[in-house]
């Protein structure tokens, strides 16, 4: 199936100059590795992502622009592939990885809860991780339901979980489970898609403050990881080229260990302390399972 998607990408790059330019420049994008807690990730300098990282996501700005995920407004060059009914697989014209797809609902409905269909997509795309940015957690089109897919091997968090890494050693809270193909597994899957985050300022629980990931493990069974979020953007966030701060707007890929920085100055200057602070502000603290859990047993 990855081959089919690679063919879709190659066919698109033949006819779509914008996408071709962005995939070509990806080959030259610089990376710098970091380690925060047990998470061994990397910063990626990616100027083409300014359009997404700097995107205004307030309701007024969204109303004023045509929805770029609706079939009628898509670029003329963009074609689709159907992997799961009701969803259009599209080549992402602003890629972070050489294989990067947007999976848009065929209907213009808001980015609501974590779509359970992600499980079907993951099952049909061995080797790929399907992921979701909640409306308040990195989605640049919160008005149109969508998820994305990239190769699992590109995502440090997925590699760590696959290797049996301890979730308590990660720098922020992560829920992870291997879903068995039986009724209890289906119930577990449903429960996990109802995990949300908690706004650190207001204390309000929010189902759209979440990033979700589903993929098939090496044994062929479904993996689900959920990152509950505490804020959409960190306090250092800036959307302007010449303002102090850091142009960083974490979505599922950033939380999975690849932090996208559209400004070269940020890429050069960002320290481990900055990264730790960003993660601690936009996610929730890791759960220490060694301490108070015994009281409830
Ligand atoms: Zn739309």
Image (cartoon, helix red, strand yellow):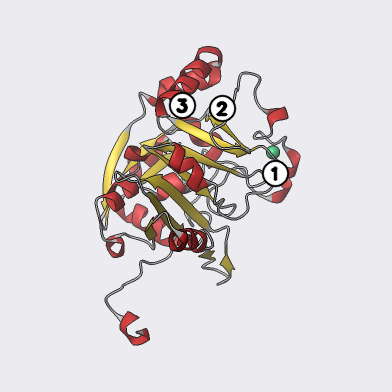
268 over 24 or under it: above or below: below
Decide: marks 3, 1 in contact (CB < 8 A)? no
Q: Is residue 146 left or right of residue 29?
A: right
Question: What residue does disc 3 label?
Answer: 5
What label sits on residue 62 in the rendered view? 1
Q: In percent of the image, x 55 and y 53: which residue is there?
A: 114
Q: Is residue 119 above or below residue 124?
A: below
Q: Which badge, 3 or 2, is on the more N-terminal residue?
A: 3
Q: Nearer the viewer, mark 2 or mark 1?
A: 2
First in sequence, mark 2 or 1: give its number: 1
User: Quick one: which residue is furthest to the front in this view?
Assistant: 182
Q: Position of residue 153 (x, y in %)?
A: 32, 38
Residues packed near mark 3 inside 10 Å, few (<14), some (14 to 19) or many (20 plus): some
The image position of residue 241, as x and y in percent, is 52, 38
Query: Which is nearer the eye, 119 or 16?
Result: 119
State the quadrant of the N terminus.
top left
In the image, residue 229 lies at what x, y percent? 48, 60
């Amino acid at each position: 199936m990855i081959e089919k998607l690679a063919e879709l990408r190659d066919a698109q790059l033949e006819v779509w100059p914008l996408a071709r330019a962005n995939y070509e420049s990806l080959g030259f994008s610089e990376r710098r590795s970091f380690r925060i807690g047990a998470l061994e990730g990397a910063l990626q300098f990616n100027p083409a992502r300014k359009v997404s990282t700097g995107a205004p996501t307030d309701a007024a700005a969204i109303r004023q622009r045509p929805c770029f995920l609706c079939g009628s407004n898509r670029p003329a060059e963009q074609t689709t592939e159907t992997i799961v009914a009701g969803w259009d697989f599209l080549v992402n014209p602003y890629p972070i990885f050489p294989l990067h797809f947007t999976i848009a609902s065929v209907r213009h409905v808001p980015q609501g809860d974590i779509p359970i269909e992600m499980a079907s997509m993951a099952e049909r795309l061995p080797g790929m991780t399907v992921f979701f940015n909640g409306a308040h957690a990195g989605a640049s089109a919160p008005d149109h339901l969508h998820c994305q897919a990239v190769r699992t091997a590109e995502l440090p968090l997925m590699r760590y979980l696959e290797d049996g890494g301890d979730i308590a050693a990660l720098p922020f809270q992560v829920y992870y489970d291997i879903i068995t193909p039986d009724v209890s597994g289906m119930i577990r899957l449903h429960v996990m898609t109802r995990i949300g985050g908690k706004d650190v300022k207001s204390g309000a629980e929010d189902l759209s403050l979440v990033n979700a990931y589903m993929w098939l493990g090496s044994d062929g069974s479904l993996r689900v990881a959920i990152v509950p979020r505490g804020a959409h953007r960190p306090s250092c966030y800036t959307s302007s080229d010449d303002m102090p701060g850091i142009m960083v707007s974490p979505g599922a890929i950033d939380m999975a260990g690849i932090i996208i920085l559209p400004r070269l100055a940020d890429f050069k200057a960002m320290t481990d302390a900055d990264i730790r602070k960003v993660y601690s502000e936009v996610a929730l603290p890791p759960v220490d399972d060694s301490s108070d859990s015994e009281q409830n047993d």
